[in-house]
Amino acid sequence: AGAGSEEPAEVPQAQKKSPWLDAWHDPVAGMSCFTPFMCLADLHADGDYRLIMVDLKKRIRIYKGTSIQWEQKLLDVPCAVQVFYHEVATPPIPTLAVASGHQVFIYRYMRPYLKFTLPTIEVAAVEAEIWEELRKESIDVQTAFDRLGAARENGTTLTNLSIDFLATEDPEQQVELVKRSKEGLMNQQASITCMEVLKQNMDEPTAVSMLVLGTESRMIYILDSTALNITCKVELEAVPTFISILGLYDVEYRITVACRDGNVYTIKNGQVLSTVIELETQPVGLVRYDKNIYVGCMDNVIHCFHFKGKKNHSLYLPVPISCMSLLQITKARVAKALVVALNNGEVRLYNGKHLITTTKTNDVVMGIRLGTFGREEGSMVLSFKSGAIMVKILQRNANLEASSAAPGPPPEQDIPLNVPKKTKLYVEQTSREREQAIDMHRTFQRDLCKLRLSTARAYVNLLGTGHGPLSSVAGASVRLNAQVSGMGPQFKIIVRVQNAGVQALYDVPLMVATNMALYRVPRPCFNLPVLVPQQMYIIEVPITCVNENGGTDSVRLFLCSRSANVPLISAIVSMPISEPPLVDGCY
């Protein structure tokens, strides 16, 4: 699988003129929507496409152009919104579907029409038996708590009631929870996580379509065109988070599902294929681009796979991905591009693995939706974290093609080097090396060993004279580090002394030696009463440059021992060039 980084190509690409035109910006819209919370649809079959938005505040709002056409409160927090056509009619009026909790609310003509409820999940027999005994008071609360915990450890899927019960640690709250549960029936409802639309028998914008739902119970449900009955259901290995659909239900279709376990599964005609795409991290976006699948991950990488599972390439991004979508134009011309919004406010446009342009915004993009808005086909609706809404329109003459330069190494690589011809001396030398290769290798190894021995002896002598970073003279192991602070003429040498041995050292003097014609040291000797093992001691040595021209020289530091003729350790400090004094004659 190939992987390519787009960073080197971004500098010239980002300088291109942006293909987006600013159409509308409402900074006080007050609706912060994720990508599944927005859709574009021709609700009245008049060619004027509306923007439908839902948010976490249980609101649904429809924009006609720049004005709010309709707004209403929802019964529950939504998780997705889509439009589909349930019948062939003239004019074709679409149906609006809002997924919320375990229900799908259907709207027609901007009025509530019907409601679809997911089937209840069968409760495990072990769990149902425990709760039944609790209601009959056959067992106490603590015994039920232990048995439910054991059932969960054995792999039994518990209901939300049991999960809440196990999460409650206070015995009084547990008893209260059990009392409340006696009043209701034991059932479990699955929540909807994602929703998409599948065409039934025709690949037309207004063809009859069906809703596809992904649930927390790891199920994929395909509803009929009336959104009343389940036509097909498929069980996955994990909870689905993103769905991408290709094909027709009556002919052949593929449903690509990205799940929370970091895998991408494919459902073909109601059957889960054995081909599983394993990702390094959890997915944050899924886009189908022709026969390719683009998956954005939490590690700031977009992986491109063929729909059969083979990896094509990867796009490495500098910041986390916020959302992804596909730009598709079919009327005026045919063009496709991948749009990626980042957490730093950038909106990037990719053609394959080539970066076309980068658009910067002043806020974090939470949701993006591309399609026809009003009567303009290439529209991009952005929903920001602050609640603002921005609409941009793609220029009709915008160039979405990749760069004409071929990707890969620079063209200079194909230019041959001007290598000189082989001389007679070169041929003789090559022949000698080939004949005497063993003797030459032995000579090289002998000289290398001598060099290593000489280096080791010199290093031992350096440590013995106290000039190394770590000294072991007189049975002591001491480290010395010095750092110069200041710009001059007043300097300060910060000396750090550490006893790396196991025994303490007593009455250790620190001497400072320098060129007295250049520097003046008020206190050249410091006495350290005791050096405790593994303890860092810091000594600040003030020093003044007395040379008018700011001359520089070295300062020597000696850590001495009263029982030895050589210092324990020494250091040479290279002083920087001194700045001139602020007032002449005063240092």
Image (cartoon, grey):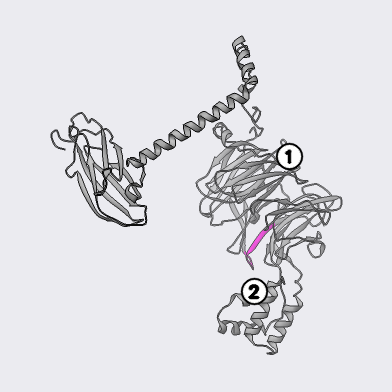
- Residue 250 in the image: above or below residue 565: below
- Residue 530 in the image: above or below residue 412: below
Q: Is residue 340 left or right of residue 486?
A: right
Instruction: Give the position of the C terminus as an image quadrant.
Output: top left
Q: Nearer the viewer, residue 105 or 309?
A: 309
| Furthest-top residue in this view | 424
What x and y, as percent, mark residue 70?
62, 58
Q: Which label number is shown at residue 163?
A: 2
Q: Is residue 567 left or right of residue 222?
A: left
Q: Nearer the viewer, residue 541 or 460?
A: 460
Q: Nearer the viewer's eye, disc 2 or disc 1? A: 2
Give the total of numbered labels. 2
Q: Which label number is shown at residue 47?
A: none
The stretch in magenta equals: 73-81
User: Label 2: how many residues lie within 10 Å, few (<14), some (14-19) or many (20+)?
Assistant: some
Magenta-span inclusion, residue 313: no
Magenta-span inclusion, residue 76: yes
Mark 2 or mark 1: which comes first in sequence?
2
